[in-house]
Image (spheres, helix red, strand yellow):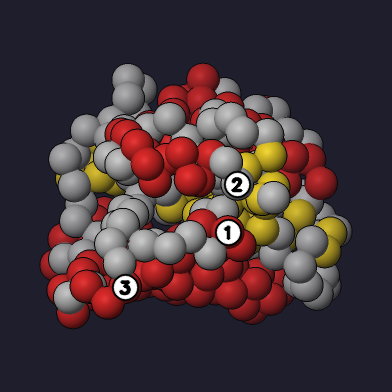
Amino acid sequence: MTINSPLCSRRALVTGSSSGIGAAIASRLVQDGWEVTGWSRRGTAPTGVQAVAVDLCDDQSYQEALQELRSQAPWHLLIHAAGQAAIQPMLLLSDAAWEQQWQLNLRAACRLVRDFPRLMPRLPSSAESNQGEVMTNSPRPMIVLFSTVAVPLVLAGETPYAVMKAATEQLTLQAAKELAPMGIAVNCLAPGPVDTPLWRTVPATAQQQVMERLDPSTLTTPEELYQQIQSWYQDHRTGSIAYSRASR
């Protein structure tokens, strides 16, 4: 079973769809026959994607958008690509900086993992969901979260971002365990730097420090991430955290 097979041509939600990884994955899903809705603060998305303006940090905006999804259920795939990095020495971080990272990089993921399964088809499975365990039946509804290689690299200046993403990895494992009886897979992409507007905001010296720690020392492409999602469909995986560009 692949992500572009007829049985998988279903409905997907992609957050952060206005640019970067979210936009690229949303486009690939459309190419493979999916009906895709894209959430972003700007309310823009690639051609073929239904764009919806949503502020994931605003309770009213989130609830209104969620209600709209309920009217279109069932949904079969969630790609939660929205996120924001912040590079600043830990001792200089304000409470507001911590709050911003918590709101977008963790709280939004927690809410989606809680709410989105109610919009997905339930496929009872006897599979127990440990990291990398194979689910027995297919196709499966899937939730894909995002972490980062900043977690294992322990990069100075990225403390709040890395902390929230480390928690997202644990959220992936916990959600995979609890949602397995419903037949819903939960996996996490943890890419190295991708050539996106977010990466271009990183100072050149910081970019160099990161690239020196990667193997190979090249940027990850959105297509690599899409292929990883496809492999999860093929292998019926849940509870997996896929790093790209192993650290050295």
- Is 22 drawn above or below residue 189 in the view shown? above
Mark seen at residue 213:
2
Residue at the (32%, 25%) spot, across then down = 46
Q: Secondary structure at mark 2?
A: loop
- On the question of residue 93 being in view, the answer is yes
* Residue 90 on image: x %, y %: 31, 73
Q: Residues within 10 Å of mark 1 (few under 14, many from 20)?
A: some
Q: Nearer the viewer, residue 103 or 27?
A: 103
* Residue 36 on image: x %, y %: 41, 35
User: Label 3 amino acid?
Assistant: Met
Q: Nearer the viewer, residue 92 or 2?
A: 92
Q: Secondary structure at mark 3?
A: helix
- First-in-chain label (1 vs 3): 3
Q: Residues within 10 Å of mark 2 (few under 14, many from 20)?
A: some
Which residue is label 1 attached to?
153
The Cα–Cα distance between marks 1 and 3, rounded to whole angstroms, is 16 Å
